Image (spheres, coloured by chain):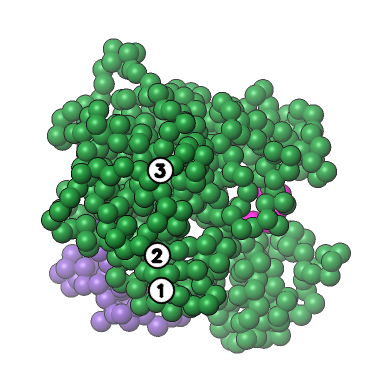
Amino acid sequence: MSPRGPQLPSTDQRAMKRPVFDVDAASLVWDRLRSLADAAPEAEAIVHVTAEGAPHRWTRGALIRAASRAARWLDAHGVRKGDVCALIVRHHPDFYPTYLGISALGALPSVLAYPNARLHPDKFREGLQGMARRSGLDHVVTERDLAEVIAPVIGGSDSTIRQVLHPLEALDLPAVDDAPVEHAPGRADDACLLQHSSGTTGLQKPVVLSHRAILEHVRRYGEAIALSEHDRVASWLPLYHDMGLIAAFYLPLVCGVPLVQLSPMEWVAAPVLLLQAISRERATLCWLPNFAYNLMADRIREDDLEGVSLDSVRMLVNCSEPVRADSHERFRVRFSRHGLRPEALGACYAMAETTYAVTQTTPGREARTIVVDREALAAGHVAPPRNGAGRICVSSGRLVSGCRVRIVDDRREELPPGRVGEIAMSSVSMFDGYRNYPEKTAEVLQHGWYYSGDLGFVHEGEHYVIGRKKDLVIVAGNNVFPEDVEDAVGRVPGIIPGRVVAFGADDERTGTEVLCVVAETQAEGDVKKLLGVAVQQAGMKIDVTITRVYLVPPRWLIKSSSGKPSRAANKARVLEQASVA
Amino acid sequence: MVADKLEKVILAELGLEDWDIVDDTAAGAVPGWDSLNHVRIITAVEDEFQVRFRASEIVRLRNVGQLQALLDGKTGAR
């Protein structure tokens, strides 16, 4: 392998590519990584990319040695097998060995989002405390900058968090002993990590995954995407999200495929960084939420792409938001002149509760589309368009081995083919239930089936996800619960408490949903204008952007049968009036 | 000091009629200026002032004062 990055394999080499599925699901993740490092200690494992300066290149051997050093340090500071360690760390090259060091001790790493500057510290602490109670966090591994903010939640009577640790700076010191450590005694069915289903701070649902679930899933998903030793994964995804953690971290590490990791914050500020990294590092695979296709197609300037080639990419996998045909088309048109092949535009359907993917499009073939009648679809039927243009639905692919899907009605009874319903699934790598959350588990898990709350249909073996059964809003890959937004806005002086609805509206330009709020007030004129800004600020305090604010007079909101303002009815009313205006 | 012209570009892009923007103003303090809208604002500033920022310059920015200084450096404070 060239020190400047790998060469694209020739056609002959591609034909001979060797799959990397010899993953033994009955082992431990740490043991798998050690055996890969023993086999090829100088092989590249992680290329840590920053906007400035040369990337930090972790070889397999160096990563294991640094992780062993981290494990010894953490052990000396009281981290024990079974403890949950929350990692709240920005993009840093020593994040990876710290994470793996926790894992080597048999403790459970759990990556949490670093607080955005706009999130009020009290709200962050409240969220962390809520998560600690639910997930049973024992230690917080973080940067010095955050120590003061976190300090008030340590050791209180209602907090499980015992201490805050700062191992990153210790890892910079000269190594005293970096011989590889042995994993704490354990079995494949032991808990390996804790990840949170995406959601508003403090309300995320904790999912514990075993070594077996991860290794089994990685093996099967690797098969589904025809992963080979010639692949390289590029990613800017945050590792507190299942797409980042499983598809773009565990999958490459466990399969011995190099990972090129960028900072999420740097990527969103300068999206061209991803394409430059793909080109420079000859990456072949990348997972992206739908909005990223729009952002890159619309916001990257041509002269920033000088010398950038995407001809190494064999698959971009669209996941975590409904896949939009328009987004794929924009991206294809924009980047085909830079070597993007249309067959590289793939998709998958995944969630933390099944470790990751349930369906995946076929490698080497663009995600299929189907044009259906909008009215029939809204009524729950898949039919060809009757009048004019229909809705283009993009397939998320076929079942990954070990997964099953059923489309069910409101009574959870299976619907015949051609019908739209809730997507239920079972998988060999499915979770056993949310940690310390039996009531939520009982809602979604029944007789071995997980009821996702997503709406979709199956056509000719391909799975199409078209929306949500519940009112969850997905903004740029992040789940936002409307209840949280309504609660925050309802506390704004001048807004009538309880007379607020929040919902998501499709935004074709950005390729994602935008968050909208309708709130009743008696204010008028200039006061009403100021109130609109105050509503947006209320959103900022819980780290959500309210894009559209509709302030309406008292008794404007339509109530549902429960007596509460109806999100669906008021959304329809507002959007109808906006379109007329 | 943040020039009126820069403030106007930012406010127009965010659809705000008025908001006090000073050197220390960070994106997170302005309604609507989130990470997703940041790239839109940067592009609008580049277009308005006929300048180009490098990715490494963009990711270093911490407040509007730094954006103004970067802009002044590009335009020679013309």
Determine whether B49 is above or below A326 in the image.
below
> Could you tell whether A275 is left or right of A118 in the image?
left
**Mark 1 Cα shell of 10 Å, populated few (<14), some (14-19), many (≥20):** many
Of pointers 1 and 3, the one earlier in the residue sequence: 1
Q: Which mark is residue A389?
A: none
Three-letter code for the amino acid on which mark 3 is drawn: Pro
The residue that appears at 84% across and 66% down in the rendered structure is A562
Mark 2 and mark 1 residues within 8 Å of each other at the beta carbon: yes
Q: What is the display colour for chain A?
A: green
Q: Which residue is mark 2?
A: A140
Three-letter code for the amino acid on which mark 2 is drawn: Val
Q: Which residue is mark 3?
A: A185
Q: Quadrant of residue A514?
A: bottom right
Mainly helix, strand or loop, the magenta region? loop
Of pointers 2 and 1, the one earlier in the residue sequence: 2
**Mark 3 Cα shell of 10 Å, populated few (<14), some (14-19), many (≥20):** few
In the picture, the quarter occupied by the N terminus of chain A is: top left
